[in-house]
Image (spheres, rainbow, N blue to C red):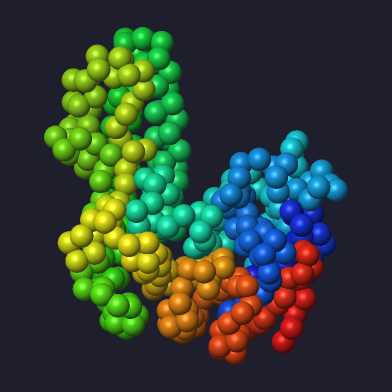
Amino acid sequence: MAVINKLSINQFRNLENQYIEPSKNINLFIAGNAQGKTNLIEAIYYLGHNRSFKTKTIAEVVHYNFNDFQINAKVDNHRVKLEKSRKKNTISIDQQRIKNTSQLTKLLPIQIITPDKGFIVNGTPKNKRSYLDWGVFHVELKFLEVFKSYNKTLKNINVLLLNNKVSELDFWFLELSKTAKEINKNRIQYIDQLKKTADSKDLKQLLVLFDSIDSFDYQFYSGWPKEVDALDEQSIYRYLSKNTQSLLKKNYLNYGPHKASLNFSLNNKNECFLSRGEQKTLSIIFWLTQVLMLVKQGVNPVVLIDDISSELDRKKITTVLKYLNQLKVQVFMTDIGDNPSLINSIDGAIFEINEGVIKSIN
């Protein structure tokens, strides 16, 4: 079970030398606009992913008076330290430097819902793949290795297509067919497990508290044309070989797992026709389904929710918090602080953020 027992944030955006000891349950951070709420959520996300969900530029996250930032934490019984600047990137666990971010992500699995990252329902295919692969990574140990191999092969193929080197393509088409099949298989198996979780009594207790959720469904699009069997290595290879000339004209591979997506529907209505409120609610249900499934498999992720009142009404907030309490996962969430019923319902710790300074108020 992942629990952040101690957290120190130094020089991250406007959070300069901040230290807290969070509750293992729910942690609510109250602040007005531009005080540091989202910065806190971003820092914790960074700690688990070694990257931001908002920017790829280090200069944007380092405090303006400094050249680097540090995030230190005690996660369960492990000491985690992340140091980053324009020139260095150091991750250590128990004072041992690690090179593989996946070790960090395994130790500190983090699930996030924030307007800045976007919702999964009616979201971009890239965002859908991000949420999907986050879940697959935590249940399939070899997924990351296969995924890296696929991306390396894809890069080589695109270089060959760009330079019109036809004679060298066949070998890489064979390699890509193998890894593409494995990625598709892992994703499909994960979605099947998700749907079984969605049909469980645990989740149905949550669904009855949301209005109009009669038939929420999602279908996987593999990223290949319909004539390709995404689970058949030979079918993928035949398609690539047959369409080599058209790929050469495009100069890149425009099909495959890197183009995969999820298609959502509610009561047989496509996601693009749903209201913003419906898209938001269904995204949260999908997200909670992922959390439940991992909890059932012994992986208790840390949950981040930014600006909860802007995304949920009071009834839904109460429902989600009760549900997360039942799952016994650690939660970090932020709010503007104008909801007394939310503050009074917190079973955990409450903090206030004022110009980047975090103080406990309970």
The answer to whether residue 282 shows anywhere in this view is no
Q: Residue at point 75% right, 36% down?
A: 87
Q: Is residue 45 above or below residue 177?
A: below
Question: Which of these two is toward me, 26 or 143?
Answer: 26
**Is residue 37 visible to the viewer in this orientation of the structure?**
yes
Q: Split into 4 quadrants, where in the image is the C terminus?
A: bottom right
Is residue 253 placed above or below 231 in the rendered structure? above
> In screen coordinates, is 294 left or right of 41?
left
How many callouts does the rendering have? Answer: 0
Instruction: Report the residue that reaches farthest toward the left.
Output: 227
Residue 242 sits in quarter: top left
Q: Is residue 65 left or right of residue 245?
A: right
Vertical placement of 290 versus 151: above or below?
below
Residue 328 x %, y %: 50, 80
Q: Nearer the viewer, residue 150 or 43?
A: 43
At which x and y percent is residue 269?
20, 60
Q: Can you tell which quarter of the image residue 267 is in?
A: bottom left
Tell me residue 64's x, y (percent). 81, 47
Q: Residue at x 22, y 32 (%)?
A: 236
Q: What x and y, as percent, mark residue 142?
A: 41, 48
Which residue shows up at 63% across the image and 44% down it? 99
State the residue lying farthest toward the right.
Answer: 65
The residue shown at (24%, 14%) is 245
